[in-house]
Image (cartoon, grey):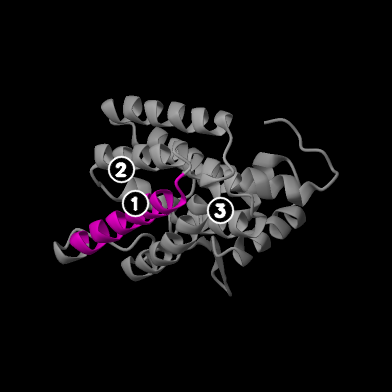
Amino acid sequence: MPKLQREKLSNQIYTVLKEMIADHRFQPGARLNIESIARELDVSRTPVWEAVRRLEQEGLVENIPNRGVFMSSLTAEKALDLYAVREVLEGMAARLAATRIDDNSLEKMARCIARQREVIARQDVLAYSKLDFEFHATVYDACGNEWLKELLETIKNKMRPLTLHMQPDFTELIDQHAALLQALRKRDPEKAEEAFRRHNRYMMAQIREDVDAGRWKQLGGR
């Protein structure tokens, strides 16, 4: 791994750690070995701790006294709460994006949907997870509200482990993405908002179904 530049080192480490989380390098509840991370990045522990404190502020990790730093766990209740908030915020983002999104972003979303169908056909859920994040992020970028975008990105990062944990009907999820894209292409704020909110409600229903059937296991319990 190349050495990181000294300038704004903690910011660079923060970005690297976020990418590692996105790649599911750290499982929910897993302990982060600060010394190991520092060695891998060829830096001292101080900027690593600074980056970890930012992750803690975002709720992605927990620093437990006398025990260490752990990836945050995710219960069914917490997941449902996150989806309830995301439903409202993503609905707002879709409504705003419907009148602001450009053709390049629409085509990017269309390509993303096509790739999602390809990776699910070969059951590559990890690749789907990355494409799902890209699809949602395109809507966030198009909404034109930086505060809303920041809130949604924070929530989405907290929810990343769910993609690998749950087994929803991925074809249905992709069809829901396509419905949102269609509404955005028609510049229809109401239909765009409803499509994104329906997408979240579907996932909430999946969680409740898993809990009722005894299939849900807390992610990262300690």
Cα–Cα span, label 3 and label 2: 19 Å
| Position above or below: 4 against 219 | above
* Left or right of 174, for residue 105: right
Region of the chain picked out in magenta, as a range: 188-210
Q: Which residue is mark 2?
A: 173
Between disc 3 and disc 2, the foreground one is 2
Q: Which mark is residue 153?
A: 3
Q: Position of residue 108 (x, y in %)?
A: 51, 29
For the point 38% across and 50% down, which residue is it? 191
Q: Position of residue 25 (x, y in %)?
A: 49, 44
Q: Quadrant of the C terminus?
A: bottom left
Q: How many marks?
A: 3
Name the image quarter holding residue 121.
Answer: top left
| Earlier sequence position, callout 2 versus callout 1 | 2
Label 1: few (<14), some (14–19) or many (≥20) C-alpha neighbours in 10 Å? many
Q: Which quarter of the figure has residue 33?
A: bottom right
Residue type marked 3: Glu
Q: Is residue 209 left or right of residue 129?
A: left
Pointer 1: what residue? 199
Judge the density around disc 2: few (<14), some (14-19), many (≥20) Cα neighbours within 10 Å. Answer: some
* In-front residue for pair 41/148: 148
Q: In the image as oriented, which residue stretches furthest toward the bottom?
A: 65
What amino acid is labelled 1 in the image?
His
Q: Earlier in the sequence, mark 3 or mark 1?
A: 3
Judge by depth and name the residue closer to the eye, 75 or 222: 75
Q: Farthest residue to the right: give it.
A: 7
* 3 or 1: mark nearer the eye: 1
* Mark 2 in CB contact with mark 1 (< 8 angstroms): yes
